[in-house]
Amino acid sequence: MTTKERYTRVIEYFSQTMPTAESELNYRTPFELLVAVVLSAQCTDKRVNMTTPALFERYPTPFEMAKATEEDIFQYIKSISYPNNKAKHLATLSRQLVEKFGGEVPYDPKDLESLQGVGRKTANVVGAVLWGREVMPVDTHVFRVAARIGLSTNAKTPLATERQLEKGFPKELLPIAHHWLILHGRYVCVARNPKCKNCGLTEVCKHYNKSIKTIDNE
């Protein structure tokens, strides 16, 4: 099977099984999404969604959060992974939004990445979710699933995976393809003991077929 054929099958499968895949983070405004994505680094969306309601009630916009201290923000996010660093990020990020962008989440990716705590992946997630930007944010789920299925080959870094996926998927599908791979990795192609029996992609999955061959040869 060629790489192109594998992409075609993956697109067909997810188009049927997840036609409306979207972020599982809860948010109402661009600012809330940005904050939620920053908090989600090395943390589950479920935990973030448990934490943000009280945070957003107290600080609904960057104008309110910009007035808060790191210690103030920490009290609302202390159940999140790395709360000290993330409190610092949010305090500075909010002030930057107010001082540089009038309290608005900037559209330009470079402006987004200029914010404290916002790297390439976070900027891409915000751009894809808010504006349908044709990018492929790569987190641990996307990195793992792409390699296992065979959508990426010998990609050693998230950036290498990102470039291969952006080349393999039609540009207009990139925003939803990002969610396809994340959700598949979160619920089916999990890190340990992937649920291959529940997967409809075993026929094209390199990892699965390699495992089958290994068993057959034993």
Image (tube, rainbow, N blue to C red):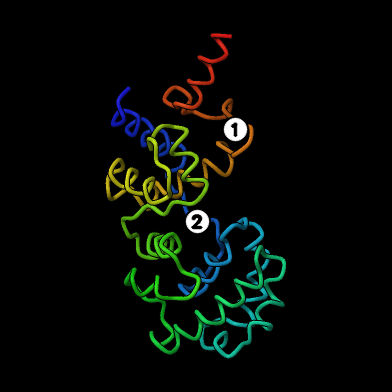
Asked where in the image residue 47 lies, by quadrant, the reply is: bottom right
Closer-to-camera residue (13/97):
97
Asked where in the image residue 122 lies, by quadrant, the reply is: bottom left
- Is the residue 26 above or below the residue 151 in the image? below
- Which amino acid type corresponds to the residue marked 1 in the rendered image? Pro
Among the two numbered marks 1 and 2 on one chain, the one whose residue lies closer to the N terminus? 2
Q: For residue 137, which numbered disc appears in the image?
A: none
Residue underneath mark 2? 23
The residue under the point 39% across, 72% down is 112
Mark 1 → mark 2, Cα distance in angstroms: 22 Å
Position of residue 58 in the picture relative to residue 202 (left or right): right
Crowding near the residue tagged with mark 2, few <14, some 14–19, many ≥20 C-alpha atoms within 10 Å: some
- Which amino acid type corresponds to the residue marked 2 in the rendered image? Ser
Crowding near the residue tagged with mark 1, few <14, some 14–19, many ≥20 C-alpha atoms within 10 Å: some
Dot 1: what SS? loop
Residue farthest toward the top in the current orientation of the protein: 217
Q: For residue 194, which numbered disc appears in the image?
A: 1
Q: Position of residue 158 (x, y in %)?
A: 43, 50
The residue under the point 57% across, 61% down is 40
- Is the residue 100 above or below the residue 176 in the image? below
Dot 2: what SS? loop
Camera-near label (1 vs 2) is 1
Q: Quadrant of the C terminus?
A: top right
- Is the residue 172 above or below the residue 41 in the image? above
The residue under the point 32% across, 60% down is 133
Q: Position of residue 69 (x, y in %)?
A: 63, 86
Q: Position of residue 78 (x, y in %)?
A: 71, 70
Q: Position of residue 126 (x, y in %)?
A: 42, 64
Position of residue 163 in the picture relative to residue 139 (left or right): left
